[in-house]
Amino acid sequence: MKIYETKTAPNPRRVRMFLAEKGIDVDYVQVDIQKGENLTAEMRAKNPLGKIPILELDDGTCIAETDAICTYFEALQPEPPLMGTTPVEKATISMWQRQVEFAFMMQIGMCFQHTTGYFKDRMTPVPEFGKEAGINASKYLNILERRLGVKEFIAGDTFSIADITALCAMDFARVVKIRMTDEHVNLARWYEAVSNRESAKA
């Protein structure tokens, strides 16, 4: 199997970190998204949306979307569990993963795309929308701060996929100058712990 990705992009990093936590090695194929290599007919045959990462299995089956790829590997190798084991754990992790992805990571992505014009050759940037998305992402830091004041990790007492998504989003946020403040003491404690995990280097 192999994964098509871009080393510098945040979503592929989420998959790499997830697999590093599991100790799973796969072959990676680099795709230059700035040059639009992800939009070729060959890549669209693997994922019609032209997005990466994409997992291609040995039989040619292609699985796109970061969550879907991670779900596949969680089922393939349940240990260590990163998406929960009990019904309550699975639901709670899924809830936080979804919220972090939509309220934080996606907002950062929209801020990046619409304020930098990085993909202006294939979309119409709306700077005001990007600015608002950045404000929304900054506000979400306060939600994480409160949550991490009562839990060691975002979804509870154990490290999970939600922490991976949040870490990758926070590191990507620096590109658009969204950062923690001195008031985010719980978030800073969490960030130091999670960013120092071996998998964070993947």
Image (cartoon, rainbow, N blue to C red):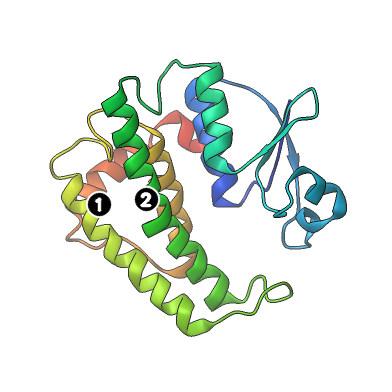
Q: Residue 4 vs residue 77: left or right? A: right
Q: Tag on residue 45?
A: none
Q: Earlier in the sequence, mark 1 or mark 2?
A: 2
Q: In the picture shown, does residue 99 fall above or below 61?
A: below
Side of 176 where 124 appears, left or right: right
The residue that mark 1 highlights is 144
Q: Is residue 80 above or below residue 157?
A: above
Mark 2 residue crowding within 10 angstroms, few (<14) / some (14–19) / many (20+): many
The residue wearing badge 2 is: 100
On screen, residue 30 above or below 51? above
x then y, percent, for residue 191: 31, 45
Residue under the image location 40 percent in, 54 percent down: 170
The answer to which image quadrant residue 81 occupies is top left
Q: Amino acid at mark 1?
A: Leu
Amino acid identity at mark 2: Val
Circles 1 and 2, Cβ within 8 Å, touching? The answer is yes
Task: Choose between 87 and 115: the one closer to the eye.
Answer: 87
